[in-house]
Every structure is written in C-alpha cells, then in structure tokens.
C-alpha cells in the first residue's frame, strides 16, 4: 500500500524543499520506490535541482516530461504521465516542463471540481506504481490545496522556531483546516540553533504533533545553495539519521520501516567510523608530541651548557665576579652546580607532568576507541540498532 504525503509551510525559507529532497533521497537509497512532485508553481523550488536532467530528457525524447502544471491545468496534453527518472528507485514530476516563459503558457480551469478530478486521476496512477508519493507544496496557501489535502495520507508542516513563522502557520491552518480530511498531521521544527533545540525538542506539538527538531547544518545549507541534493554519507551523516527518525514515525508499513532501519544502520556505522577516525587522529597527534620531548631536553641541556661555558670563560679572562661571586670562590663553585641541578629537576618535573597528562589522555582515547569498535561490531551483528543506540 502506497503512502502520499504533503510538505507544507506557512512561510518561505523554512527548509521545506530541502527536507522533501532529503527524505526522497533517503527513501530512494532505502530501496523504496518514490515519486517526488514539485507543486511549487511560484518559485519551482525542487525543479531547479534537476533542471539539467529535465532539459536533457526533453531534448532527447519526443515526449516531454509531465509537469505538475500539466496535471492541474492541461491534462488533455499529458496522456500517460511521464516522470523524470532520477535513480533506480526515484522519479520526479517537475513543477513545469521547462523553466521558461513558454513553459507556463496555457489556460486554467475555472471550477475546483476539475482540479479535484485531475489530482485524483494523477494520484490513482501514482499509487499504482510507487510506494511513496511526496508533494513538495508552495509555501503558504495554493488554490489546489483544498482538493489535494483530502487525497493524501499525511501532512508534514515545516516551520522555523520564531513567532513570524508560527503566525504564518496559524494563518495557513485557518485556510486549509477544513480540507485536511483524515490525514495524519505532523510538524517539524527546522534549522534550530543549539539553544532552540533544547527548548523545541521537548515540545509535543502546537497545531500538530511535533515529531522532530532539526539543528541548522551549514553543510546542508551549502549543498542547497549549490542546487545539490545532500549526500548524507558525504555531507552530514547526523542529518540523515535525523531524517530516518522522522520517516520511522511518518511511514507505518512494516516493510518500509525495515528498509529505513537498514539504511539508518548504515548511516550510524558511518558516523561511528568518522568518530573512530577522529580519535585515531588525536592519538597520532599525541604520539608525535611525545616524540618531540627528547629533542626539547637536548636543546635545553645544550643551552645551559653554552651559558655556563660563557660564564666560566668570562670569569677566567676578566677575573671579575660572576653573579656576585668570584669564579674561584667556594660559593661560586657551589652556585653553578646548584643552578644546573635545579634547572634539570624543574624541567624533569614539568616534563613528567606533561607526560602524565599525555598518558591519561591516551588512556581516555583508547577507551573511547574500544567502545566505538565494540558498538560497530554489535551494530553489524544486529545487537545494536539506531533505535536503541545512545551514540
């Protein structure tokens, strides 16, 4: 049984499109057949990410890729729906066939009944071919929402943690509240600061059930600014794990859960591997620092020997006092060895403290490394899963 989900936000800039793209990519890598639909006819947000592939497909094929604009307003030109293939398990319906003035030409029906019929026809086709259908909707209200929302299984509202976006979400809820039907309603706080995370991660819900709070991740933001779909294993493993947790709540099918859990385990193993690599780097730095100690001792002894030699030479040739004592006096003969002994002991004690600190730090790193290796072993053996892991 397929699951259809809408991604909604009261105001632009909440990260809704990034979240939709990320979840679509996650499902694709989990071997779940997914269709992502860009419903944003205003800014064509998700379409920009696949614009080059869309252009190549339209140029090389006699049949143009179906667009959401076609589905809504020009169903007579669509015939059989033709999505853009993104990967083995993922297809994409762009907002428009091409991002140009000519791509937006055509009349629009006046009656909402026609919109409902067109959307129902499209969704019936999609449910027959895909496990999951994701609708990335335009921020705020759109005229087709009252017809689309009753047809889907779940709605995910994405908002940032501020009063303006909360007010915008309230406004959207007032406009579409009667159209939500029996769909499960969820919300996600996105792009939170560490301080906001501590607060909003404890909120059960506002208008809808809160199922996650996502920290702002500059690597994800950087990928978005370059029109790149984030690769979790190369960009941000933690972001991928957070999306897996969200998906485990949204999708109720056991087989979908199993596939997402498997991919989540791969991401967790990658995270543990990165942590293990970082600890190994710290140990290497400690070892390099330890090797530099003998050279430091030799340099100090050389300096002390040179200073003492100069003092004695000056005393011999001048017959003057050195440090207020003559070189041939008893006190001078006692003073020089005392300075040498005190200097050496002072350095040994300081070096011993540094050595003790390094040994203690090395012991901590080795213990952490052992725990990570044990957890990776248990993860691969199925003893530990992302759900019961505390990493």
Image (spheres, grey):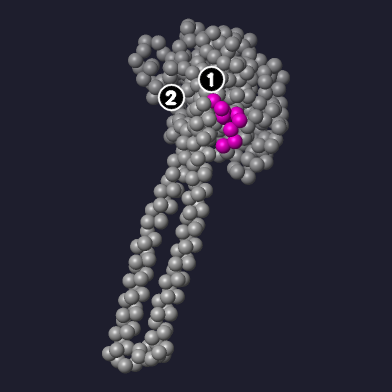
Taking the image as drawn, is residue 30 in sight? yes
Regarding mark 1 in the picture, which secondary structure is present there?
Answer: helix
Residue 320 horizontal/vertical position (percent): 34, 92
Would you say residue 384 sits in the magenta stretch? yes
Write down the region rendered in magenta.
382-391
Left or right position of 356 against 314: right
- Vertical order, 170 against 182 (above or below): below
Is 359 colored magenta in this rendering? no
Q: Which mark is residue 50?
A: 2
Residue at the spot 40% in from the left edge and 10% down from the top edge: 63
The percent position of residue 260, horizontal first and vertical second, equals: 54, 22
* Residue 330, image quadrant: bottom left
Foreground residue among 106 and 165: 165
Quarter occupied by residue 11:
top right
Q: Secondary structure at mark 2?
A: helix
The image shows residue 221, relative to residue 94, as above or below, that is below
Residue 385: where, in percent of width, then height? 57, 28
The residue at 37%/59% (across/down) is 292
The residue indicated by pointer 1 is 259
Q: Is residue 105 visible?
A: no
117, above or below 68, in the image: above
Circle 1 packing at 10 Å, graded few (<14), some (14-19), many (20+), is: some
Residue at 63% x, 24% y: name it: 249
C-alpha separation, residue under disc 1 versus residue under disc 2: 26 Å
First in sequence: mark 1 or mark 2?
2
Where is the N terminus found, in terms of image quarters? top right
Foreground residue among 142 and 292: 292
The x and y percentages for residue 362 are: 48, 50
Principal secondary structure, stretch drawn in magenta: loop
Is 200 positioned to the left or the right of 312 in the image?
right
Q: Is residue 329 above or below residue 245?
A: below
């Amino acid at each position: 049984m397929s699951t259809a989900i809408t991604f909604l936000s009261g105001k632009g800039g909440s990260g809704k499109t990034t979240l939709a793209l990320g979840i679509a990519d996650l499902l694709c890598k989990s071997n779940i057949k997914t269709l992502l639909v860009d419903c944003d006819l205003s800014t064509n947000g998700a379409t920009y990410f696949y614009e080059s592939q869309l252009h190549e497909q339209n140029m090389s094929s006699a049949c143009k890729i179906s667009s959401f604009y076609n589905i809504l307003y020009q169903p007579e030109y669509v015939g059989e729906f033709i999505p853009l293939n993104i990967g083995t398990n993922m297809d994409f319906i762009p907002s428009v066939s091409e991002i140009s003035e000519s791509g937006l030409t055509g009349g629009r029906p006046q009656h909402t009944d026609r919109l409902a019929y067109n959307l129902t026809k499209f969704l019936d086709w999609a449910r027959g071919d895909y496990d999951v259908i994701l609708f990335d909707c335009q921020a705020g209200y759109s005229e087709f929402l009252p017809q689309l929302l009753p047809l889907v299984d779940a709605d995910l509202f994405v908002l940032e943690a501020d009063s303006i976006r909360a007010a915008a979400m309230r406004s959207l809820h007032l406009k579409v509240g009667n159209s939500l039907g029996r769909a499960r309603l969820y919300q996600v706080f996105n792009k939170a600061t560490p301080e906001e995370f501590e607060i909003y991660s404890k909120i059960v819900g506002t208008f809808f059930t809160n199922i996650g709070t996502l920290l702002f991740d500059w690597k994800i933001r950087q990928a978005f600014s370059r029109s790149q779909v984030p690769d979790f294993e190369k960009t941000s493993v933690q972001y991928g794990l957070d999306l897996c947790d969200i998906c485990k709540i949204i999708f109720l099918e056991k087989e979908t859960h199993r596939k997402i859990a498997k991919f989540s385990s791969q991401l967790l193993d990658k995270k543990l591997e990165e942590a293990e690599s970082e600890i190994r780097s710290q140990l290497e730095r400690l070892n390099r620092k330890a090797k530099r100690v003998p050279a430091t001792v030799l340099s100090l002894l050389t300096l002390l020997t040179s200073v003492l030699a100069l003092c004695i030479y000056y005393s011999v040739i001048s017959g003057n006092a050195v440090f207020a004592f003559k070189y041939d006096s008893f006190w001078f003969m006692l003073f020089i060895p005392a300075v040498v002994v005190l200097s050496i002991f002072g350095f040994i004690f300081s070096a011993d403290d540094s050595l003790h600190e390094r040994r203690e730090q090395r012991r901590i790193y080795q213990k952490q490394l052992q725990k990570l290796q044990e957890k990776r072993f248990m993860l691969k053996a199925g003893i530990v899963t992302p759900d019961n892991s505390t990493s």
